[in-house]
Image (cartoon, helix red, strand yellow):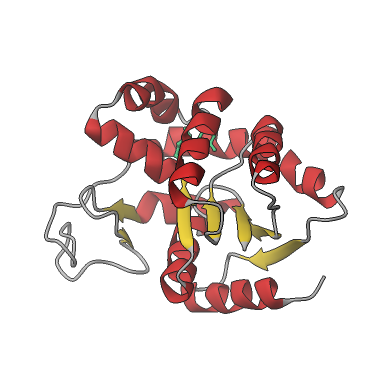
């Protein structure tokens, strides 16, 4: 299983990807999470990515592709993987198929998640995440038990800098210009089934729809 979760920021790729992977034992590979942990560790890659991320721009393809290649090597050729936030450009998609080809695999499904902008903006403005364990909350829909504190590890929650309103608008524009074209890119490939899931529903309903979309015969 090589699944790609494709959709705008705030649509729920991270939440849904994590739920699916926890239940099924798949590996959740989020390039955003990998970059954030590189930044926390202060690695050269993390330092290079910082400016792009804070402005809501895409990190250059070479950096992302190298990072994913390394991750795939670490996981080995047989692991089931759910990609979240990758690929985000056509060159990244092409690099992914080359990497998969090399190990005799291919993308099994592209799941396109969608929701209207006001929903995305509200979700991103309410998002709080734990810098220690990565758990994500939302002050409107899934708040922590104690305001500002992670239920799981007690760390202080943060509002991602790139979830500020101005940066969010930029990220939505970047999604439309650079990432949304991947939908028709994959639709043109006869061997890659593309399915749609309505990301505006609540968390459990999206998860049910996502699982159904993965079962569907195409
Ligand atoms: P995310 O957590 O997926 O919203 O990603 C946060 C930020 O990390 C994005 O706004 C980009 O700056 C960067 N990023 C994550 N994944 C990619 C990718 N596949 N290509 C380029 N930049 C990325």
Indicate whether 6 appears above or below 49.
below
Location of the N terminus by quadrant is bottom right
Side (left or right) of 1 relative to 29: right
Q: Nearer the viewer, residue 18 or 101?
A: 101
Task: Place residue 41 in its image quadrant.
Answer: top left
| Tally of numbered discs | 0
Residue 46: percent from the left, percent from the top? 34, 27
The residue under the point 68% across, 39% down is 93
Task: Place residue 155 in its image quadrant.
Answer: bottom left
Residue 84 appears in the picture as rendered? yes
Residue 23: percent from the left, percent from the top? 44, 76
The residue under the point 75% across, 48% down is 183
Indicate whether 14 appears above or below 25.
above
Task: Place residue 148 in its image quadrant.
Answer: bottom left
Side (left or right) of 71 relative to 3: left
Indicate whether 81 appears above or below 218.
above
Residue 115 appears in the picture as rendered? no
Residue 47: percent from the left, percent from the top? 32, 22
* Residue at the outermost left position: 154
Residue 176: percent from the left, percent from the top? 67, 38
Side (left or right) of 139 relative to 113: left
The residue under the point 37% across, 25% down is 45
Indicate whether 154 appears above or below 121.
below
Location of the C terminus by quadrant is bottom right
Q: Nearer the viewer, residue 56 or 185?
A: 185
């Amino acid at each position: 299983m090589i699944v790609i979760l494709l959709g705008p920021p705030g649509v729920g790729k991270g939440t849904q990807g994590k739920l699916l992977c926890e239940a099924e034992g798949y590996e959740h590979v989020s390039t955003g999470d990998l970059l954030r942990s590189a930044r926390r560790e202060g690695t050269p890659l993390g330092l290079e990515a910082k400016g792009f991320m804070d402005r809501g721009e895409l990190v250059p393809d070479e950096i992302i592709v190298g990072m994913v290649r390394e991750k795939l090597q670490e996981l080995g050729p047989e692991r089931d993987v759910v990609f979240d936030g990758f690929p985000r450009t056509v060159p990244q998609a092409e690099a992914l198929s080359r990497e998969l080809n090399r190990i005799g695999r291919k993308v099994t499904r592209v799941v396109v998640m969608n929701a209207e902008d006001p929903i995305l903006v509200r979700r991103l403005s309410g998002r709080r995440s734990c810098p220690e364990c990565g758990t994500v909350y939302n002050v409107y829909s899934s708040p922590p038990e104690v305001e500002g504190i992670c239920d799981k590890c007690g760390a202080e929650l943060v509002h991602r800098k790139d979830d500020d309103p101005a940066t969010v608008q930029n990220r939505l524009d970047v999604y439309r210009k650079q990432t949304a074209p991947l939908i028709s890119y994959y639709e043109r490939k006869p061997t890659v089934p593309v399915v749609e899931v309505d990301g505006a529903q609540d968390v459990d309903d999206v998860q049910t729809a996502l699982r159904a979309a993965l079962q569907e015969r195409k």
